[in-house]
Amino acid sequence: MTDRRVDEKEVGVRPGERTVFVTRTYMPDLEAYTGMLRGIWASGQVTNNGPLCQELESALLPHHGTRHVLLMGNGTITLQIAIRALEVGGEVITTPFSYVASTTAVLWEQCTPVFADIAPDGFNIDPSAIEAAITPRTTAVLATHVYGLPCDVEAIERIARRHGLKVIYDAAHAFGTLYRGRPLLSYGDVSSCSFHATKIFHTVEGGSVACNDAALYDRMRLMRSFGHIGDAHHIAGINGKNSELHAAMGLLVLARFKEILERRREQWERYAACLSGVPVRTAHIPAGTQYNHAYFPVVLPNEAALLAVVEALGAIGVMPRRYFYPALNTLPYVNRSGGCPVAEDVARRVLCLPLYHDLSDAWIERIAEVLNRTVR
Ligand SMILES: *Cc1c(COP(=O)(O)O)cnc(C)c1O
């Protein structure tokens, strides 16, 4: 579907415009990046926690709101390292509505994902479903702040405390969201973020873990670099490092992040205004949230309507994405016992509309118009 090329003349795409995908990577000023590359060339240090990685890590700290942050190679290894460092085993209660990496990370760490359904009329895991899924083998909850919208962090923390469970947040979408005046990334025992090129803040490939516990931080830091410092080998680690070239990209994108957030809010509000009166459900921003407006999901009345919208948008060169489909509890390699009817239903009907820094207002209006025409 996303590989389909549309003849721009035929479909009336304006000259010079290309296919509109769900996202487009923010590219900083090339001259500025070249300048940073010159510095890297001069020093000869391209990786292994060099000065740019350290500078980025420090600059990222206030965006996470925790005592410690580690920059890593991607947002999947961060989840795996968090699971490992917290000594999570047995069953991990997780969400059926997320990107597949939040389930595969659990599986790769030899744990059993147990799926707790999402809340009706929302996108995030339902705390009462978490409570119902707890068994003597449960050791942790791995929840995703889907689309950068906060989970019910207070309820999850209460349940975790009562049952002695660890809480890991897959906060891959949450960079820039504040909840109750604090970065959403500051909640949980560990929050993991992704800085992949498709995310609102990116380092091309990259990720972070954030925590407050110093011993946990030390363990994750060791794990990031094969578990040794010089010749002293402490634990069995892995390679979770990132490079100076990625950190340079991150520093330049971070310098523009305020503008990216501001523009995203305008675009998001334009979609919301254009779609008011169209019978689709959009995201509800919970009270106390300063949202990063990372995604614009629409839940269509049924799957047939979704397919009709995909077709109609495709005809004008627009490629939305089925984020997230299918529900993760239906993956062929997980234990399918116990359905998650809410997540399975939403996964069949949800579409993320294109949203990125230089998507024009005119495109937003055209996309909304197609939706309006198709769904009515
Ligand atoms: C992008 C994403 C990941 C994976 O991050 P990578 O940096 O691509 O490894 C994990 N979870 C969610 C919810 C994501 O959207």
Image: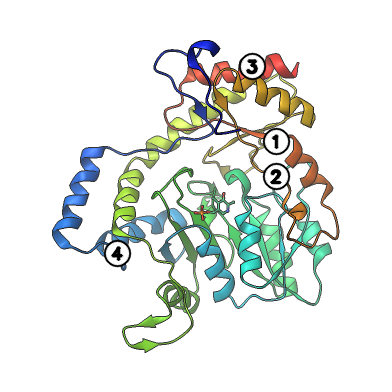
Sequence-first disc among 4 and 1: 4
Disc number lying in front (4 or 2): 4
> Which residue position holds label 2?
123
Instruction: Calculate the distance from the C-alpha at mark 4 to the C-alpha at mark 2.
Output: 38 Å
> Which residue position holds label 1?
350
Instruction: Calculate the distance from the C-alpha at mark 3 to the C-alpha at mark 4.
Output: 47 Å
Give the percent coordinates (x, y) of residue 300. Answer: 74, 29
The answer to which of 243 and 342 lies nearer the viewer is 243
Q: Contact, CB < 8 Å: mark 2 with mark 1? A: yes
Q: Contact, CB < 8 Å: mark 4 with mark 1? A: no
**Residue type highlighted by circle 2:** Phe
Q: In this view, does 284 lie to the left or right of 6?
A: right
The answer to which of 4 and 109 lies nearer the viewer is 4
Which numbered circle lies on residue 47?
4
Element under label 2? loop
Which image quarter holds the N terminus? top right
Which numbered circle lies on residue 370?
3
Give the percent coordinates (x, y) of residue 203. Answer: 38, 50
**Residue type highlighted by circle 1:** Val
Element under label 4? loop
- The residue that appears at 73% across and 41% down in the rendered structure is 347
Question: Does residue 375 lie above or below 170 as drawn?
Answer: above
